[in-house]
Amino acid sequence: MMDDCSKTTCEHAENVGAHLQGELLGSESAAFTEHLVGCADCLESVRDFDRLIEQLSAVPGLPANPQLTDQIVAASRTASSGNSTILFRWSLLSRVAALFLAIAAGSWFLSHHLGAPVSARDNVLASTVDWLVDAQDENGSWAPVKWDGRDEFEVALTSMSLMTLLQSTDPSDLQEAAISRAIRYLSGQQADSGLIGPRGIGMMYNQGIATTALLGAYERGRDPELKGTLDRALTYIRSTQGADGGWGYARGPQTGANTAVSVWQVHALYQAKQAGIPDEGDSLRRGLFWLQSLVSDRGFVGYQNDPQYGRGSDSLTAMGAFCLFEASDSFGGLEEMNARLSETLIAGTASRAGAEDFYGSYFLSLAMQSRPGPESEKLLRSMQRNLLETRVTEGVHEGTWDPVGRWSQVGGRLYSTCMAALSLHAG
């Protein structure tokens, strides 16, 4: 038989909201649950809340109105009823509705003025991480051929996947296990020379990206034994540096240094320096000088130090700019040139980056993060909104990005997904 429990006197009434939000712990939760069995009014309040939250969850984004909460609460005070239980329930529900709508309005404001809300971005990235964990092979790698990529870049794509998983601030046990497997796989691909992965035209991509990923794991204290692996990897990078300070597709001067390969080596050397690993042979400084030589008077970064390559693309400019921006605190004399690069990126077509060029979006996001400011923030958020709008939102590939645009025929879904996810983490 139900108790005759009035909302104006019931000692449990104030716990309705806390119960629904999971804030009651231990004996409090047990006591309230037992109380619901005998109190019709409290049980009805819980049901009212459930229905209200379900209905409000379907409300589309609303324009921000700072007075919205006060208006709704004020309206509740004018409600008159001879039944104190109904009045109490209306007042309580109206306050919840006001709070919910205020939050919805705030989310609308953030999404239209600052980019995607953090909660929406985090939800997308959570589904991305889940997909990556499921897609990992037992040996710790991510096989490109399963996802429309090319096998010769398995080391690079596994490294990109590891970099994405390492962004999680509170990884689950499954994610931790996936990270450990990836680290073991990459370490196991290293030859005595320090090269990670097979020899071939793209081996320096594998080397630079794998070293960057393993440095990320080392900096987060994942595995202190990585130091030996990293020392050998960095030694190999230094040994393949050209006399001019850059790196090409394969070892030896015949290939010619280019920006696309060199930025990964420069970034790895800088990351190593930040982790306390000395810059032996001044390789980092030499690499930065080489990148500087490719910056035109108009603020573009070329592909090679050769007039036939013209001014350089937006993506190449973002690559070079990122390395030069992040090193500006450690090396003097870069500010004037970096200001020119920043102006070029902000004024260019880079703000429309997204699915058209995942690689360019990644380096652009890092460049803007390395040189914060109102315009950089605006460009970064615009690019991130573009990425969020193109993600896969349902089906077996939920949380990924379709392999479209430049380089996707090489890296497949792993490339597009990891580059997009890492771009969203920036800022």
Image (cartoon, rainbow, N blue to C red):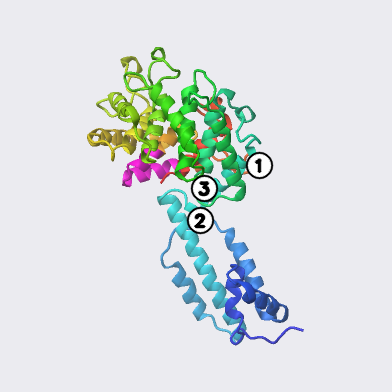
Indicate whether 40 appears above or below 105.
Answer: below
Secondary structure category for the residue under label 1:
loop
| Quadrant of the image occupied by residue 301 | top left
Q: Nearer the viewer, mark 2 or mark 3?
A: 3
Measured as percent of width and height from the top left, residue 415 is found at: 53, 32
The residue lying toward the viewer, choosing from 390 and 326, is 326
The residue lying toward the viewer, choosing from 78 and 17, is 17
Measured as percent of width and height from the top left, residue 196 is found at: 51, 27
For label 2, the residue is 61
Q: Bounds of the magenta span?
A: 366-387
Q: Is residue 386 visible?
A: no
Secondary structure category for the residue under label 2:
loop
- Amino acid type at circle 2 is Gly
Measured as percent of width and height from the top left, residue 401 is found at: 56, 37
- Amino acid type at circle 3 is Ser
Could you tell me which residue is drawn at 63 percent across and 73 percent down? 26
Could you tell me which residue is drawn at 49 percent across and 72 percent down? 72
Name the main secondary structure of what is drawn in magenta: helix
Q: Is residue 226 visible?
A: yes
